[in-house]
Image (spheres, rainbow, N blue to C red):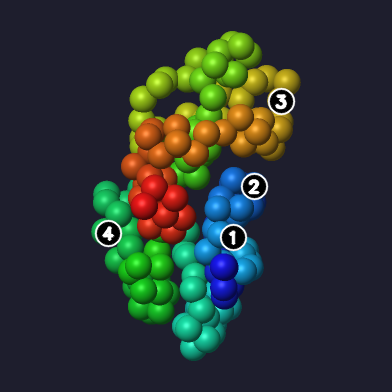
Amino acid sequence: MASRTLYVLLEGNDDERFFRTLLKPYLERRYRKIKFWKYARERRKNTLKFIRSLRRMEADFIFVRDIDMAPSVREKKQEIAKYYEDAIPDQAMMIVVMEIESWYLAGSDTGYFQERGIRLGAGSTDDLTKEMFNQLIPPRMSRIEFLNEILQHYSLERGVSRNTSFRYFVEHWIRIYH
């Protein structure tokens, strides 16, 4: 039976949409409640206070961040640790390679998009950037509509096979393959 609450600290709306729609049902197998908090909208001081509060409560939390321009996951984690004064334990940090859009596209249904004239490669999405993703959005569709379409036709198994950091997240936080 699920117990406790898991706090998921995210950058923005696209991250929350992905976690809330796709991952929350899996996380609820292990946690009674899932609460989302978008730190990119907060001052660093407020985020730091929130993280320290979670640590005092001994609450479970995940701090999710895109790798962006960092040369490695390790260096990104060091950058985050320094910025947040070592308040976030290494095991609570989840680095998305490359950006959350790479996780969206990793599990997308290539057949569904082929029907709409959108060409997707069948390989890894580890190098996909937000700019590359945005070029795939059909001209008469908003970004949000496109993201929602992807989530409606998403395969967790396909996502795990096409993105290394997504596979790491699933194996360590969802553990459906263990």
Alpha carbons under labels 2 and 4: distance apart: 30 Å
Alpha carbons under labels 3 and 2: distance apart: 20 Å
Residue indicated by mark 4: 75
Residue indicated by mark 1: 28
Residue indicated by mark 3: 141
**Which class describes the residues within 10 Å of circle 3: few (<14), some (14-19), or many (20+)?**
few
Mark toward the viewer: 4 or 1: 1
User: In terms of secondary structure, where does tag 1 sit?
Assistant: loop
Residue indicated by mark 2: 21
The quadrant where residue 28 appears: bottom right
**Which class describes the residues within 10 Å of circle 1: few (<14), some (14-19), or many (20+)?**
some
Check disc 1 and give the amino acid type.
Glu
Q: Residue at x 73, y 21 (%)?
A: 140
Q: Residue at x 47, y 20 (%)?
A: 120
The quadrant where residue 172 appears: bottom left
Alpha carbons under labels 4 and 1: distance apart: 31 Å
Residue projecting furthest to the bottom: 56
User: In terms of secondary structure, where does tag 2 sit?
Assistant: helix
Alpha carbons under labels 1 and 3: distance apart: 32 Å
Mark toward the viewer: 2 or 4: 2
Quadrant, the N terminus:
bottom right
Q: Residue at x 61, y 53 (%)?
A: 25
Q: How many numbered marks does the figure carry?
A: 4
The answer to whether marks 1 and 3 mark residues whose Cβ atoms lie closer than 8 Å is: no
Check disc 3 and give the amino acid type.
Met
**Which class describes the residues within 10 Å of circle 4: few (<14), some (14-19), or many (20+)?**
few
**Which class describes the residues within 10 Å of circle 2: few (<14), some (14-19), or many (20+)?**
few
